[in-house]
């Protein structure tokens, strides 16, 4: 059956000489793996740019039940990035987001509200006025809520985890900071010292690993720390 959907590219693997297997989180069909033939060619006809991580695409796909690898009939760029590919800080955040998304969802997992949030997050990252220092933290706390394990109050984020690395003064400061981020999102003017912000990021990643049962370190985290944290 042929279906239309929007998608967020998560990863691709080389397959044979010129093809790839690409994982795309689609709005209507969920996380799917697609075999794309003949894209790893040189010249103007190459469409590899469409299948870079976190690219937003509009798709026409063949969707068959009980089939692992699906096929794409048509793929078009949905949103051309103006800043993410050309700004090292934004690129590092994009790689971080891609890895977090990939570890949080599974094949055929479908969640339209989560997709809409991810699409909004990616386009926000490409905007000039976004606060990059807060971005990974806002992304983690909001995404956890769409996945069903993120509380609505900052204090619960800080108390529900098995790991509790903060002092009482730090907890008070973080409670105010997180509540402001929950209300204001990616454009929040909230302020916090860099050391505590890095500590909070590590805490939230541990919070994720507790709920998703995945404790292996993120490969993108080291780059993110060097450029932003």
Image (cartoon, rainbow, N blue to C red):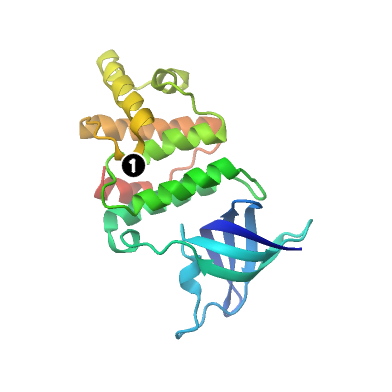
Q: Which residue is found at the position 64% from the left and 66% from the top?
A: 60
Image position of 99 (left or right of 187)? right
Where does residue 7 sit, x and y in percent of width and height? 55, 57
Q: Quadrant of residue 3?
A: bottom right
Label 1: which secondary element? helix
**Which residue is label 1 attached to?**
135
| Screen quadrant of the C terminus | top left
Image position of 140 (left or right of 223)? right
Q: Which residue is found at the position 56% from the left and 41% from the top?
A: 113
* Residue 166 visible to the viewer: no
Image position of 42 (left or right of 171)? right
- Up the image or down, 198 lies above or below 37; here it is above
Q: Residue furthest top?
A: 168
Label 1 Cα neighbours within 10 Å, binned few <14 / some 14-19 / many ≥20: many
Along the line of sight, which residue is nearer the eye, 147 or 167? Answer: 147
Q: Which residue is found at the position 55% from the left and 35% from the top?
A: 147
Where does residue 201 sit, x and y in percent of width and height? 35, 35
Image position of 140 (left or right of 174)? right
Where does residue 115 sit, x and y in percent of width and height? 54, 47
Q: Residue furthest bottom?
A: 43
* Residue 39 visible to the viewer: yes
Along the line of sight, which residue is nearer the eye, 142 or 209? Answer: 142
- Up the image or down, 225 lies above or below 75; here it is above
Q: How many marks?
A: 1
Where does residue 29 sit, x and y in percent of width and height? 66, 52
| Screen quadrant of the N terminus | bottom right
Q: Which residue is found at the position 43% from the left and 33% from the top?
A: 141
């Amino acid at each position: 059956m042929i279906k239309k959907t929007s998608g967020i590219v998560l990863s691709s693997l080389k397959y044979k000489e010129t093809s790839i297997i690409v994982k795309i989180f689609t709005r209507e069909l969920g996380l799917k793996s697609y075999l794309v033939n003949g894209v790893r060619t040189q010249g103007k006809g190459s469409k590899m740019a469409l299948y870079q991580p976190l690219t937003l695409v509009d798709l026409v796909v063949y969707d068959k039940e009980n089939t692992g690898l699906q096929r794409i009939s048509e793929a078009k760029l949905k949103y051309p990035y103006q800043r993410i590919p050309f700004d090292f800080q934004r690129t590092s955040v994009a790689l971080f987001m891609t890895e977090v998304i990939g570890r949080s969802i599974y094949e055929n997992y479908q969640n339209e509200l989560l997709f809409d949030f991810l699409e909004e997050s990616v386009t926000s990252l490409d905007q000039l006025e976004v606060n990059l220092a807060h971005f990974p933290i806002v992304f983690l706390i909001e995404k956890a809520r769409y996945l069903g394990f993120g509380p609505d109050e900052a204090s619960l984020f800080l108390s529900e985890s098995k790991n509790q690395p903060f002092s009482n003064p730090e907890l008070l400061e973080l409670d105010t900071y997180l509540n402001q981020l929950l209300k204001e999102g990616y454009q929040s003017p909230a302020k916090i010292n860099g050391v505590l912000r890095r500590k909070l990021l590590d805490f939230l990643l541990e919070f994720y690993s507790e709920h998703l049962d995945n404790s292996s370190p993120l490969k993108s985290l080291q780059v993110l720390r060097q450029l932003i944290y």
